[in-house]
Image: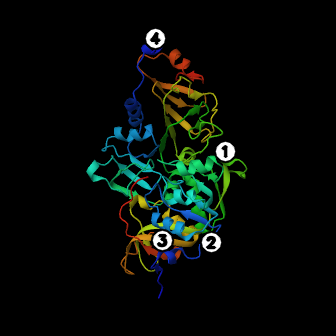
Amino acid sequence: MSAATAEFKPFSRVKMAQNVAADIPEGWYVNLGIGIPTAVADHVPLEREVIFHSENGVLGMGPAPEKDKIEPWLINAGKQYVTLRPGGSMCHHADSFAMIRGGHLDLCVLGAFQVAENGDIANWATSENDTAPAVGGAMDLAAGAKRLWVLMEHTTKDGTPKLVHRCTYPLTAMAAVKRVYTNLATVDVTERGFVVRDMAPGLTFENLQARTEAKLYLPA
Amino acid sequence: MINKIVQSMADAMADIKDGSTVLLSGFGSVGQPNVLIDGLIEQGAKDLTVAANNAGAGHIGLARLMELGRVRRIICSFPRSSDPVVFETLYRAGKIELEIVPQGTLAERIRAAGAGVPAFFTATGVGTKMAVGKEHREINGRTYILEDALYGDVGLVEAWEADRWGNLTYKLAGRNFNPIVAMASKLTIVQTQHIKELGDIHPDHVITPGIFVDRVLHVPYGDPGGF
């Protein structure tokens, strides 16, 4: 670890999920993408009624089942076993995506490879020659939900910034992202560009900018 | 008397022709008519176009059908799986064509076919590789692309309950693509866990009315497993 990184403490994966969960109000219909975003649900208390949706036709998902109470016919989009809370319902795939594409979801949280300062998102393929591209529901979610938030590491493992001026990877959707939660900061996508809402403890604005390709702004 | 229940797999698979487009339901192995896929393997039709969310796992079911060289082209949203070795090997070798489609566009294309809508505009995919070569139109200030309906010559469906008119119910997440595959296919073939007497499925509980169904085969195999 370099001296520069020793000065601050990045948000842990758990804290990142908690940061997102804290900003979701009761009553929202929410789709959580596969991977880190799925963990957000663990940090929304059941008494705050947030209704989680899964692309395969599940609305009102509850916590993961105990091992001896698995229902083999009830899975989420990540093909993990889930539960249905009282009030939950099932629908077919076209209706499930009508919820997404018809603008009925208040929020979708996705992972990403890159987010650009104009809100473009790239999260489904890392090169133009991907041998077996797999898009799933990401393009529908990004284009259809009322809000798209991204939850991701601030840089790649080798330190390459993921908050960029323009995406270099194939796009998932244009001008779709409203907010980004990373291990270093929470950043809003605005007409000015990226505006920093929150930073990891001990991190300076200059230090955050040094790890970000796009220009950052402080709230006006 | 109408009786769509067939007594054998051979009867269920009769007359599926080479070159058919086969719509296949299922999300992972939940709601996927695996026994009918085995029947299609046995039946022998080739040069198939298969539309399914995933491109098979391991060496069984859809993966086996591809491995046997019977699938010319696959239309899917997520060709990766826990074990996508068959698809990836064929794809890298240039032995199978892939049309990648956003999952919601795939579902809507199938539903549109079932509803007699030949094409529709959607915002999904605008500004991405998916939009290349497609008609764009601005409607009320937003840009959309035109997507075609996806019709099936054959649809393979898994139901929870069925009666002799072909009325169907599904179990939990086993519903997924099944109702729209039934709507969109000229020949809809169903495997069902339970056969009910006509009238024993409450009319409020029927999810796919029998008008969308041609053949029903009783396959009480139990719970899905493995993805």
Residue B122, image x, y percentages: 63, 53
**Circle 3: residue type:** Val
Q: Are marks 2 and 1 on the same chain?
A: yes
Which secondary structure lies at badge 1?
helix
Residue B17's mark? 2
Task: Measure the C-alpha gap from mark 2 to mark 3.
Answer: 18 Å
Q: Is residue B2 above or below residue A143?
A: below
Marker disc for residue A3: 4
Are the numbered discs 2 and 3 placed on the same chain, yes or no? yes
Q: Say whether disc 3 or disc 1 marks the residue closer to the N-terminus.
A: 1
Q: Residues within 10 Å of mark 1 (few under 14, many from 20)?
A: few
Q: Secondary structure at mark 3?
A: strand
Q: Which mark is residue B129?
A: 1
Crowd around label 3: few <14 · some 14–19 · many ≥20 (10 Å): many
Which of these two is toward me, B111 or B160?
B160
Dot 4, crowdedness within 10 Å: few (<14), some or many (≥20)? few
User: Callout 2: residue from which chain?
Assistant: B
